[in-house]
């Protein structure tokens, strides 16, 4: 059977594209490699699905072309996402920093909307379908895929690559979209894990491992960007929201600076306290801000046994540098298995920002994570997926 479009990938972008195409009276076939659609939707936000962010702006995305995402994000806005899900019974509750979750806290409710709508709108979803090749033919594209051990072929005038990126291979993630792009002569921006924990090795490894499980509200800083949220010490390095955010900008060899008390000045606080009680030990004072385990661990770096009145000018400098300028040089990251998304992908130079169609290959579209548009942590990548799926559906 011929379709208006074959969509490769039944994730956020692919499902939105199928539904929006259905509204326009277009027939699509969604080919999903897994035995269910929406695998990453289902695990996102701890199974709760942070499905958009109320404060989405183009600045929340990383791309070789910072302006590329503007068109799609203006065609399908956050308000559009909120209204779409409300129409089908999902109201949102705002958590930290504009993150919107379903009030039910169930990611499966998001997926169910799309599967129900695909059925109502006569959009076909084919599970356990492993696409082997995409080729241009006279009528558009020929797609070969394997299902239940049998090779099948289908044709369509348009093909939508919505098969995601490289993170979480055990969930079926592959570089198939990138290979298709390369086969058609399209440029790829260098890929790397993003929103990923960072590792620490060598002489500092024991310090971080000893603090595993300790979370501290911090400002994590690179020269041109910083994020103020929790960091989490782990037995292999650092994680937590602020670390995941900065990891999308971090490159091997870079050092990051962490302000462990970003909204106050430790020197001013100590000065104030010692005017009241100079006999108080520094370690006791610091326990107002950090766990006892953390205070004990930093005794090798700052004079925690001293009382406040006996702290010297050099001591204050040492304390300020440690608390407000804690420097870490990560050895690497935890890789695609622990990354939430992929940085890089199909070059935006190759695509129309208005339609997401390949400039060199009419009828070939790329959306979602496989494109060189990477959102921050907190629902931004879902907003990009919904927006790109909507835009593509208008143009297939």
Image: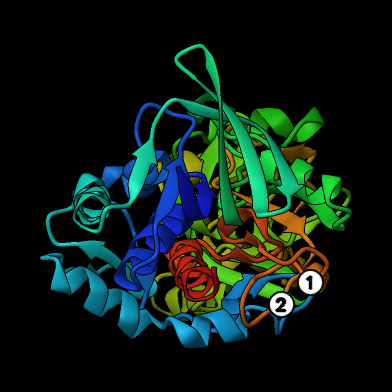
Determine the secondary structure under disc 1.
Answer: loop
- Residue 207 figure quarter: top right
In front: 136, or 53? 136
Residue furthest out toward the top: 149
Residue 10 shows up from this direction: no
Report the residue marked by disc 2. Answer: 352
Quarter of the image that includes the N terminus: top left
In front: 101, or 385? 385
**What percent of the width, then of the height, locates residue 392?**
53, 69
Q: Are marks 1 and 2 in contact (CB under 8 Å)?
A: yes
**What percent of the width, then of the height, locates residue 123?**
32, 52
Looking at the image, residue 250 lies above or below residue 60: above
Looking at the image, residue 213 lies above or below residue 218: above
**What percent of the width, then of the height, locates residue 220?**
63, 64
Residue 362 shows up from this direction: yes
Residue drawn at point x = 51 percent, y = 50 percent? 7
In front: 7, or 344? 7
Report the residue marked by disc 1. Answer: 359
Residue drawn at point x = 61 percent, y = 46 percent? 196
Determine the secondary structure under disc 2.
Answer: loop
Residue drawn at point x = 74 percent, y = 43 percent? 135
- In the image, taking residue 252 as reference, residue 289 lies left or right, namely left
Pointer 1 local density, CA inside 10 Å: few below 14, some 14–19, many at least 20: some
**What percent of the width, then of the height, locates residue 41?**
37, 47
Pointer 2 local density, CA inside 10 Å: few below 14, some 14–19, many at least 20: some
- Residue 333 figure quarter: top right
């Amino acid at each position: 059977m011929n379709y208006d479009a074959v969509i490769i990938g039944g994730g956020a972008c692919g499902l939105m594209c199928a539904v929006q195409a259905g509204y326009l009276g277009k027939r699509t076939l969604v080919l999903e490699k897994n035995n269910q659609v929406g695998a990453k939707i289902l695990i996102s936000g701890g199974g709760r699905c942070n499905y958009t962010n109320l404060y989405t702006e183009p600045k929340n995305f990383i791309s070789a072309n910072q302006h590329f995402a503007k068109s799609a994000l203006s065609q399908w806005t956050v308000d559009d996402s909120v209204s779409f899900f409300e129409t089908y019974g999902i109201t949102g509750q705002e958590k930290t920093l504009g993150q919107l979750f379903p009030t039910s806290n169930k990611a499966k409710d998001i997926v169910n909307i799309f599967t129900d709508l695909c059925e109502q709108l006569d959009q076909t979803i084919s599970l356990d379908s492993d696409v082997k090749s995409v080729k241009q033919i006279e009528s558009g594209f020929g797609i070969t895929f394997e299902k239940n051990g049998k090779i099948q072929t289908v044709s369509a005038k348009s093909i939508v690559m919505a098969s995601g990126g490289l993170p979480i291979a055990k969930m079926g993630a592959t570089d198939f979209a990138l290979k298709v792009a390369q086969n058609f002569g399209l440029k790829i921006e260098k890929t790397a894990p993003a929103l990923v924990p960072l590792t620490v090795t060598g002489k500092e490894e024991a310090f971080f491992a000893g603090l595993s499980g300790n979370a501290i509200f911090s400002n994590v800083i690179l020269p041109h960007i910083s994020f103020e949220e929790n960091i989490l010490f782990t037995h292999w390095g650092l994680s937590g929201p602020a670390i995941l955010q900065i990891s999308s900008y971090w490159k091997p060899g870079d050092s990051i600076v962490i302000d462990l008390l970003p909204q106050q000045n430790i020197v001013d606080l100590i000065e104030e306290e010692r005017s009241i009680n100079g006999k108080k030990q520094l370690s006791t004072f610091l326990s107002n801000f950090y766990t006892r385990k953390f205070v004990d661990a930093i005794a090798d770096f700052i004079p925690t046994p001293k009382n406040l009145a006996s702290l010297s000018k050099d001591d204050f400098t040492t304390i300020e540098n440690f608390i407000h300028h804690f420097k870490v040089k990560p050895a690497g990251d935890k890789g695609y298995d622990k990354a939430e998304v992929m940085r890089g992908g199909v070059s935006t130079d190759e695509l129309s920002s208005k339609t997401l169609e390949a400039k060199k290959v009419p009828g070939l579209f790329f959306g979602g994570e496989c494109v060189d548009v990477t959102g921050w942590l907190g629902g931004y990548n879902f907003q990009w997926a919904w927006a790109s799926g909507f835009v593509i559906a208008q143009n297939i």
